[in-house]
């Protein structure tokens, strides 16, 4: 089966949505299918990965030969136009509960929906309720993220996600080292004067070696998070995660997460301090590892179902 994904960014983009699609496509490649990514713009540098990328504003021409189309976000409209012209099944992957994507999938060309979490799927219950649905958690194989810690920093990844909290908590804990990792999208919240106990680094293609190996605790203070991939990546190495109680983070981290109100800086500082107790840290580290294995086991079943789901849509 020839599967083409129409994406607004390359699948190698560091954003969680693209990482999810990339992992799905690689899985389908391993199952023996052919995968291609089409990016609806004039030009770009083809990523160095097993998935061929085509940059073209002529999406209809670029997807010729596909059996099934996948798409998401603002790439849904051009993908829908191409699917309508060519009579192809179009599966739209939903990563959030935003109104824009709910409007876009009302196109008659969208034939099925895929969701990154159960709660997002439930939120969409009244949107195109007759369309077939499938849930796939963003694939994170714990074996890919297992690491031996070489440092003991408190880390946040992507400072566009309520990054102000990191700086305030760092000021409350001047004797604690922090790592602020810039994200691949969004306005990064960085003060003009960076506290001495905070190191800022650029996005990296090696999160395991350059981020998680240096991280003792991960902060995810997002005000909105439909799943929270970085939390599961950190959990794979037994790194405790302090997180906002968004529906997505609660679904992904479950009992392993230390959930704190993002409006209460003191509670975040207290949680970091509590994890300085070796017994407390060991308990949460163990739970993090266990949760990452549970989620990966569920994800593998979902991926197996994804292949069958695509075959059904092809007819």
Image (cartoon, rainbow, N blue to C red):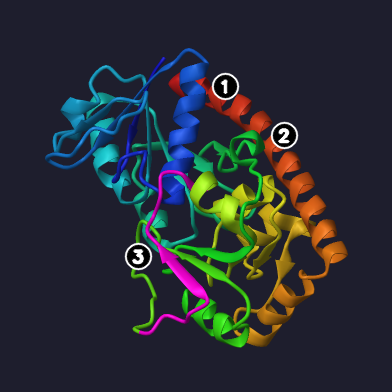
Inspect the magenta stretch and tell me whether residue 205 lies in it.
yes
Question: Does 180 sit left or right of 237 as displayed?
Answer: left
> Residue beneath label 3, please?
186
Instruction: Work out how far the residue at label 2 is from the one at label 1, CA to CA, in angstroms.
Output: 18 Å
Question: Does 150 sit left or right of 38 as displayed?
Answer: right
Instruction: Work out how far the residue at label 3 is from the one at label 1, CA to CA, in angstroms.
Output: 35 Å
> Residue beneath label 1, please?
308
Instruction: Work out how far the residue at label 3 is from the one at label 2, CA to CA, in angstroms.
Output: 32 Å
Helix or strand or loop: what does disc 2 sit on? helix
Does any portion of residue 125 appear in the rendered image? no
Quadrant assignment, res 142: top right
Nearest the eye: 74 or 180: 180
* x then y, percent, for residue 315: 46, 18
Nearest the eye: 134 or 40: 40
* x then y, percent, for residue 75: 30, 45
Question: Does 205 sit left or right of 212 as displayed?
Answer: left
Crowding near the residue tagged with mark 2, few <14, some 14–19, many ≥20 C-alpha atoms within 10 Å: few
Nearest the eye: 147 or 78: 147
Helix or strand or loop: what does disc 3 sit on? loop
User: CB of mark 2 within 8 Å of CB of mark 1?
Assistant: no
Residue at (69% x, 75% y) in the render: 260
Decide which of tag 3 and tag 1 comes sooner along the chain: 3
Q: Is residue 3 above or below residue 151?
A: above
Does any portion of residue 216 appear in the rendered image? yes
Magenta span dominant secondary structure: loop
Quadrant assignment, res 264: bottom right
Residue stretch in magenta: 193-207
């Amino acid at each position: 089966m020839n599967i083409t994904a129409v994406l607004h960014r390359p699948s190698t983009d560091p954003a969680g949505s693209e990482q999810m699609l990339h992992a799905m496509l690689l899985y389908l490649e391993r199952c023996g299918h052919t995968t291609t990514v089409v990016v609806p713009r004039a030009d770009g540098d083809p990523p160095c990965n097993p998935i061929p990328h085509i940059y073209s504003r002529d999406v209809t021409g670029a997807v010729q030969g596909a059996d099934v189309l996948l798409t998401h976000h603002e790439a849904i409209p051009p993908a829908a136009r191409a699917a309508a012209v060519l009579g192809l099944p179009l599966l739209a992957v939903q990563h959030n509960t935003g109104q824009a994507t709910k409007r876009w999938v009302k196109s008659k060309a969208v034939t099925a929906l895929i969701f990154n979490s159960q709660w997002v799927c439930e939120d969409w219950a009244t949107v195109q309720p007759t369309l077939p649905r499938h849930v796939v958690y963003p694939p994170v194989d714990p074996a890919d993220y297992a690491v031996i810690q070489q440092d003991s920093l408190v880390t946040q990844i992507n400072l566009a996600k309520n990054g102000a909290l990191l700086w305030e908590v760092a000021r409350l804990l001047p004797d604690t080292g922090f790592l602020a990792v810039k994200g691949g999208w969004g306005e990064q919240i960085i003060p003009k004067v960076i506290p001495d106990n905070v190191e800022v680094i650029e996005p990296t293609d090696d999160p395991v070696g350059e981020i998680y190996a240096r991280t003792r605790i991960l902060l995810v203070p997002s005000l909105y998070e439909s799943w929270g991939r970085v939390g599961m990546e950190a959990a794979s190495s037994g790194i405790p995660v302090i997180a906002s109680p968004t529906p997505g983070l609660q679904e992904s981290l479950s009992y392993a997460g230390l959930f704190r109100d993002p409006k209460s800086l003191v509670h975040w500082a207290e949680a970091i301090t509590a994890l300085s107790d070796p017994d407390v840290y060991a308990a949460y580290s163990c739970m993090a590892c266990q949760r990452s294995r549970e989620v990966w086991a569920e994800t593998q079943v979902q991926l197996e179902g994804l292949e069958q789901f695509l075959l059904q849509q092809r007819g």
